[in-house]
Image (cartoon, rainbow, N blue to C red):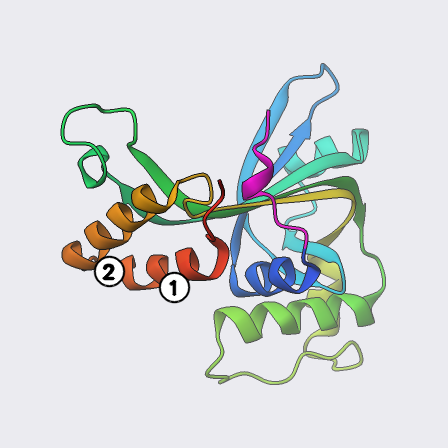
């Protein structure tokens, strides 16, 4: 059962998270009903997930056979050891993270202008420093490549977000974890503290 205190419904928070990420996991099923999970790069734009790759291969075969897919994106911020809040028991050990899962329809994009726009978004995310010609559908250098690459659009029917940053803790437990993060000073502990302050009011 999903804990309601971790659920995020603000569209702007979800969009900001997805647009800041570049890697997710595509869930498909083959014609026998066996599940398949494929890690891949993606972009999120105007409520749609996009990925690209070869026209051939297992994931494309699965999509052609069954358009219903799921797509998950997650970012782990910090591991929270049990001793931050309990000197003896292992039970409080956990991880703080953001995750989004979408369920919906996958469609192969045929329009070259849309393909060019999507691949431009990929380049802006993966190569923000530039160093390439703008991608346009009417450029003879890009047109055959745009025809040759597969671009898939996922339109979510359902989208759920879980941002876990100790919202279930009582005030003293929350203070213990924040103190532990401050003292540890790990690579993302400062970010984690910011997320706790943003999403983690005391829940009686």
- Residue 4 on the magenta span: yes
Residue 177 horizontal side relative to residue 58, left or right: left
Position of 21 relative to 88 (above/below): below
The Cα–Cα distance between marks 1 and 2, rounded to whole angstroms, is 13 Å
Residue 1 locus on image (x, y percent): 59, 24
Residue 175: in sight, yes or no?
A: yes
Magenta-highlighted residues: 1-9
Badge 1 density bin: few <14, some 14–19, many ≥20, Cα 10 Å: few
According to the picture, the residue beneath numbered tag 1 turns out to be 194
Q: Which residue is mark 2?
A: 187
Residue 26 falls left or right of residue 193: right
- The residue furthest right is 111
Front one among 1 and 142: 1
Residue lying at 23% horizontally and 38% vertically, measured from the top left:
85
Residue furthest out toward the top: 32
Query: Mark 2 or mark 1, which is nearer the start of the sequence?
Result: 2
Instruction: In this rendered view, identify the residue nearer to me: 51 or 57.
Output: 51
Q: Position of residue 204 (x, y in %)?
A: 49, 40
Residue located 85% across and 64% down the image: 111
Label 1 sits on a secondary structure element that is helix
User: Mark 2 falls on what kind of element?
Assistant: loop
Residue drawn at x 31%, y 42% as measured from the top left: 173
- Residue 31 is situated, as x and y percent measured from the top left of the image, at 75, 19
Which of the 4 image quadrants contains residue 42? Answer: bottom right
């Amino acid at each position: 059962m999903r804990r309601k205190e971790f659920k995020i419904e603000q569209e702007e928070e979800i969009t900001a998270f997805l647009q800041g990420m570049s890697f997710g996991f595509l869930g498909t099923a083959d014609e026998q009903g066996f599940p398949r999970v494929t890690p891949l790069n993606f972009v999120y734009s105007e409520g749609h997930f996009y990925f690209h790759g070869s026209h051939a291969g297992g994931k494309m075969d699965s999509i052609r056979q069954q358009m219903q897919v799921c797509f998950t994106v997650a970012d782990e911020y910090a591991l929270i050891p049990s001793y931050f809040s309990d000197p003896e028991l292992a039970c409080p050990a956990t991880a703080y993270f953001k995750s989004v899962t979408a369920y919906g329809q996958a469609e192969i994009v045929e329009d070259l202008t849309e393909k060019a726009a999507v691949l431009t978004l990929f380049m802006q995310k993966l190569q923000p420093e530039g160093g390439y010609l703008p991608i346009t559908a009417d450029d003879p250098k890009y047109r055959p490549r745009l025809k040759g690459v597969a671009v898939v659009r996922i339109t979510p029917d359902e989208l759920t977000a879980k941002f876990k940053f100790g919202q279930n803790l009582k005030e003293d437990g929350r203070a213990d974890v924040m103190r532990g993060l401050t003292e540890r000073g790990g690579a993302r502990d400062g970010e984690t503290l910011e997320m706790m302050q943003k999403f983690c009011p005391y829940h009686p």
